[in-house]
Image (tube, rainbow, N blue to C red):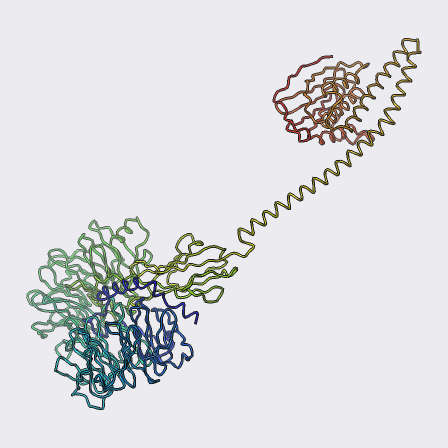
Amino acid sequence: MERLKAHVPRWSVRAVILCLLLLFAVGTRQAHALDARRALTQAFLRKWQAPQGLPQATVLSITQTPDNQLWLGTRAGLYQFDGIRFQPGPVIEGIALEDVWIHDLAADGEGNLWLATNGSGLIRYREGVSQSVGYDGDSAALWKVMLDRSGNLWIGSETGLVRRSKEGQLTRMDESVGFTVTNVHGLCETKDGSIWVGGAGNTLLKWNGERFEPRVLINLPPTTQVTAVVADPSGTIWAGSHHGLVKLVGVEEQRLTRGNGLADDSIECLTISHEGNLWVGTRDGVSRIQGDEIESFRTRDGLSQSTALAIYEDHEGSIWVGTKHGLNQFVDRRTMPLTINEGLPSDDTGPIVQDDAGTIWIGTLGAGLARFDGRRCSLAFDQNSGLPSGMILSLSSGGDGNLWIGTDQGLSRLQADRITKTYGADEGLPAETVLSLCRDRQGTLWIGTSKGLARFQDGMIVPADHGNPVLQKPILSLMADGSAGVIAASETGVCRCTTLAVELLVQQDHRFQNVDAMLRTADGRLWLGTRDRGLLMLDQDGRVSQFTVKQGLYDDEIFGLVAETEDRLWLACSRGIFHVSRAEVLACAAGTIPRIKSNPFTPSEALRTVECQRGVQLPVYQVDDGKIWFATNQGVLIVNPAQMTRKFPPPQVIVEEMQVNGKNADLKSSLRLPPGLTNVTFRYTAATYAIPQRVGFRYMLEGFDKDWIDAGQRREAFYTNLPPNSYRFRVCAANPTMEWSEAAEPVNFIVPPYFYETTWFIALSAACLVLAAWGAYRLRMMQLRSQFLAVMAERLRIARELHDTLIQGFSGVTMQMQALANRLTANKEQQTLREVIADAGFCLREARRTVAGLRNTHGKATRLSAAITEAAQQNTHGHDLQLTLRIVDIPDLLPNEVEYNLLRIAQEAITNTVKHSGARHLEVSLQVSGRRLYLSIVDDGRGFQTDGAEVRSPGHYGLIGMRERALQIHGQLQVQSSPGRGTTVRIEIPLGKFPQHGTEWPLEVAAKDTLS
């Protein structure tokens, strides 16, 4: 039930739009309706049976709702048809679908579809919901439902007649109002609002608003059954019965039967087309009545089955016929065929010509000459009426009321509607097979035979080849040229011929062999169709252009040419009919475009697959009314170029169904899908029936697609893994002229997120994450503080131990040495001892500096500049070494650890110079440049090889220690040395903000060099 709900549009919202579309369709229907001037056999017939997808073969009733959907009532329920697909209708609750016979259908303007069934009562279908509706009757079969112009519903059944008002009030008609019939099959309303009723018996009842007035059909037996009643626009009443058709005009009555041309006497259904023609469904086919003319169409003509149970004209003018074995559609063709059904003696047609009187003549290949009277053909002449043969190969108007007929047995002259003379070899023809005929502009008749060219002059046939061997071959085509003469195409070349001379058109060009068709256009160009070399174009300057399938031509075999307009060129070929743009052909010849576009007529355009006729002259001919006639192996096809630009109403689009993860969704409600159901399928359609296979679609899912998606003829759209969002599905359809229409109601739906995809959940998660990060940070800080306190405790312990052991002991040693120095009297020994005491004092101060560093990371005992100066002077004192100091006064802004490690690096470098280099000069530099600090120690000693220097002296870790200290303070240490070239130790430290110190380094620092 849910799927079927989605099949029907939402009437309450679309009512105004549907009405406007219906008015538009009715207004344009006349332009696209079945042409009443054509025979039924000239219409294009489509059939649907089980192989074509028809679900149930017996079609009992047909109607169309305002949204253009076609509905079929069958012996197995209701079906919807959009021109391509059949969809089952609603399942009625409590009623098995396969048991419901739907005898009749009626659609009102409020979105209701009324169903008359065979025992399941009256059913109303609206907005996807079906329900049985009481009608004040028993379980008898309902045969007919009809809506009058007041909106009342009339219901005919086995037992009588019931009227249901728009408000739902039921009135059963009985004898009190003059109702006397049963088994009501016929109901109609006339222009004056009268209701006519027909049932069992030969009496019709007319409702005048108060009572029924009887009208006895005197031409029908009392035991008959009236099966259908209709009223045409003139007010004429037509009543069908099992004993023929009755026509009522006022008090006059006429009975029509098989003897009058009806397909059968047993009438099943009637309908009036918008043109006022009566269509009659019988047990042996359908009949169409226009005025006094009756035309029938039976199974032998192509109807799916003989018994026509329902006839309906849709909004586009097509006629639909339901039979016991299929659905049939009569569609107007873009081409009009003439075949044996329209009176041709044979479908194997040949040359076509229109004479000076306007009569169109059609030659056949074996059955003689036919004449067209404006609607049908008839055999005019054959061997029994004076022609030497029924094989007509060429035709030409004589200009004086004569018609020249070329056959394979000679040339005949038709004059005053009779064959007056036949010419053969004895009368001067080079051969009796006359392949081509042409009258030039001076009136001379030129004759092309299988053995050369001749002309008819002064009542005689004389040779016209002037001894030219090209013109002694079969002459395939002739064309009048200039003021006199013709152009003649033979198997070996093309010549310009006059009564005086012959000129070869193009010298020794094999492309001009076997030319079957020629055409001179207004611009002076000569166009030639060949048998296997495509299309040739000869300019006035003699330049030749060739076009084949490689250049876009539809076929390389061209049998006929017609210039319909200044731009459009029609061509006949072995594959059928096509046209090209002359402007495109000229552009291709000039090289501005690579290919031309061929526009073939195809079977999808109501044209049978045919092969145009070759081997005859004039297989393509344009008559005075502009129509183009094509001779084919299946009759004549007439193309009306004016219909090339006919307009089609834009098709109305309906979204039939939406499936979410394989389950149907209710399109009538606001759709909010469950989270995670992200695979969506849309099924849509556009109900149009003239050329349904040429309807194109495009769609877009707003919120997902960036632009329209071209779906071609596909009627489904698929989306997978849709992210959470609000969406709007839109779909458009285009008719054959590419006019687009859009669905009246786009489908709006929401794909909600899972709870963990919602904003509040993401925000809460982010807050929890921030809180967790803050907690982790706090925990880490506590861990670091604990570690820091532990390190500080250890540092303090080490400081105490150094103070209480090394420093105290070293102080005692120093004091004893000082006491000893005071007792010594020799100046040399005293001096030496005092120097040792000074060195010991320096070491003692350094030890105290170390202890101070361990106890306090910020406080400083001595500034870095002074400490490096003192260390340099102390280590070089007493050595034959010149010391140069370039020390800037560093502000007290560096962390103690940085200063401490810089000092130790300087001490190590100076000590190595004094002990190992043998240098005579030493320079110590402490400089600041920009935001970087540079410490360098340079000597001119013996130097060393730096590669592997850190590992060549086991137990000596001076360089390694310096590098480790540099890394601790984020510095870069460079040691440059080579044997005999001295040594340079340089460390570079970036001066940024030291978090431990909390200060910024000043941009400029005053510096002063010191020499000692």
Does residue 692 lie above or below 190 as drawn? above
235, 15: nearer the viewer: 15
31, 510: nearer the viewer: 31
Q: Quadrant of residue 61?
A: bottom left
Residue drawn at 84 percent across, 26 percent down = 803
Give how far across and how far down residue 616 sits, in percent: 21, 68
Give how far across and how far down residue 565 sits, in percent: 20, 57
Q: Is residue 555 visible?
A: no
Q: Quadrant of residue 717?
A: bottom left
**How many labels sit on residues?**
0
Give how far across and how far down residue 798 sits, in percent: 82, 31
Q: Quadrant of the C terminus?
A: top right
- Horizontal arrangement in the rendering, residue 968 relative to residue 590 (left or right): right
Q: Quadrant of residue 408?
A: bottom left
- Horizontal arrangement in the rendering, residue 283 relative to residue 754 (left or right): left
Q: Is residue 260 visible?
A: yes
Give how far across and how far down residue 180 sits, in percent: 23, 87
Does residue 86 lie above or below 765 as drawn? below
Q: Quadrant of the N terminus?
A: bottom left
- Horizontal arrangement in the rendering, residue 148 relative to residue 965 (left or right): left
13, 218: nearer the viewer: 13
- Horizontal arrangement in the rendering, residue 797 relative to residue 326 (left or right): right
Does residue 582 lie above or below 40 as drawn? above
Residue drawn at 61 percent across, 48 percent down = 768
